Image (cartoon, helix red, strand yellow):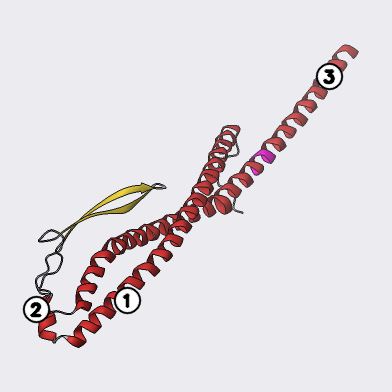
Amino acid sequence: MAILQVNPTRMELSRLKTRLKTSTRGHKLLKDKRDDLMKKFLELVRRNKELREEVEKKIMGVYDGFAIASAVMSPEMLEEALMLPKEQVELEVGSANMMSVDVPVFKFTQSAGGEGDIYPYGLVSTSGELDDSVAALKEVLPALLELAQMEKSAQLLAEEIEKTRRRVNALEYVQIPSLQETIKSITMKLDENERGNLARLMKIKDMMVAQQRQAHGQ
């Protein structure tokens, strides 16, 4: 692991120890955040899978109903019946904070032209399968919007998980080991310098003692 290019001083050693302590604490916090994000992401994935299966089943039923209606009605009559829908949907897109990630929140309202009347055509000239398909399409819309909201949330969480994972790895395998090796290297150099200074002091002391003995001998 590469050692940081710094001056081997006690002040620098103290600064690096502070950085190491901060990096270690940040590493733990990021690991906890990553684990919480993964837990929430897996919950979303499971719910998303269930909801997708439910929505696909309902949409297949709608398609089957339209297929039967198109078989018993002429294309012109079917197109005319669906040309001017009575149902209106207003969608409001907001956001919510989920594990420090802004995820979309869809709020929508549905309104029909008459009370309980969602069919934009007269019921006399159309097939019952078309009526059932239009009613089923109204029922599947909330689940479809919830699925879109959930899939986008899962995508944003996955991106945040990947960013957090890279930060955790950078701290765990690069920054923290570099700081530890640099601290170890500076500590060894300072200890070596201290031993050298101690040896010089002892040598000077011996020289001074020898000089004093010579002076007393004279």
- The vertical placement of 3 against 87, above or below, is above
Q: Earlier in the sequence, mark 1 or mark 2?
A: 1
State the mark number for residue 60.
1
Residue 186 belongs to magenta span: yes
180 or 83: nearer the viewer: 83
In the structure shown, which secondary structural element does the residue marked by tag 1 occupy? helix
Q: Earlier in the sequence, mark 3 or mark 2?
A: 2
Marks 1 and 3 sit apart, C-alpha to C-alpha, by 103 Å
Marks 3 and 2 sit apart, C-alpha to C-alpha, by 117 Å
Please state which of the two labelled residues, at mark 3 or mark 2, is closer to the viewer.
Answer: 2
Report the span colored magenta: 185-189
Residue hosting label 3 = 209
Residue 73 percent coordinates (x, y): 15, 85
Relative horizontal placement of residue 155, taking residue 2 as reference (left or right) = left
For the residue carrying disc 3, how many other residues have a C-alpha within 10 Å: few (<14), some (14-19), or many (20+)? few
Name which residue type carries label 3.
Val
The answer to which quarter of the image holds residue 199 is top right
Residue 70 percent coordinates (x, y): 19, 84
- The vertical placement of 70 against 96, above or below, is below
* Quarter of the figure with the C terminus: top right
- The vertical placement of 47 against 69, above or below, is above
Residue hosting label 2 = 80
Name which residue type carries label 2.
Glu
Please state which of the two labelled residues, at mark 1 or mark 3, is closer to the viewer.
Answer: 1
118 or 195: nearer the viewer: 118
